[in-house]
Amino acid sequence: DGSGRAFNSIIDLRAAKIENFLSVAEYEFVSRLLIVRYEDLKFGGTEVLLREIERETGVKANCRPTPAQSEDKVLTLPEGQVGWLNEFVNWEVENLIGYLREEI
C-alpha cells in the first residue's frame, strides 16, 4: 500500500509481492509477462519455457532443455498445515500465478 508499515504476516507480504510482480505486465516496454513456477520446471523440464521464449523473442535457444526430475520427492504437507494455509493465504492472488487451494 506504500505506507511503509510492516505487513501483518509473511502471507500478506507474499500476496503483495505477487500483485507487484504481475503489475510488470502493464509497463509500456513489456510485451509479455511469463509466469514460471519452480515446480513446473522441476517436474516438467525447461523445454516448454525455452520454446515459449523463442516464440516471443524470435531468437533460437543456444542451450539444451533440462529434463524433468522425478516427482517422487513431492512434498506432502500435514493436514493441519494445509488447513492453516487454506484459511490465511489469499487464494485469489495465488490463483493468478497458477496455485490452487488444496482441499482436505
Image (cartoon, rainbow, N blue to C red):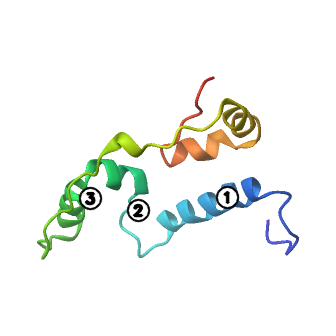
Q: Is residue 79 above or below residue 30?
A: above
- Give the distance between the C-alpha atoms of the residues marked 3 and 1, in whole angstroms: 24 Å
Residue corresponding to mark 3: 49
Circles 2 and 3, Cβ within 8 Å, touching? The answer is: no
Q: How far is disc 2 from disc 3 in space, using C-alphas?
A: 12 Å
Residue at the extreme front: 72
**Sequence-earlier tag: 2 or 1:** 1
85 shown above or below 1: above
> What is the crowding at mark 3: few (fewer than 14 residues within 10 Å), some, or many (at least 20)?
some
On residue 14, which mark appears? 1
- Where does residue 4 sit, x and y in percent of width and height? 85, 75
Q: Nearer the viewer, mark 2 or mark 1?
A: 1
For label 2, count other residues whose C-alpha is less than 10 Å away and answer few (under 14), some (14-19) or many (20+).
Answer: few
Q: Secondary structure at mark 3?
A: helix
SS at badge 1? helix
Q: What residue does disc 2 label?
A: 33
Looking at the rendered image, the quarter that the N terminus falls into is: bottom right
Q: Return the residue nearer the eye: 77 or 5.
A: 77
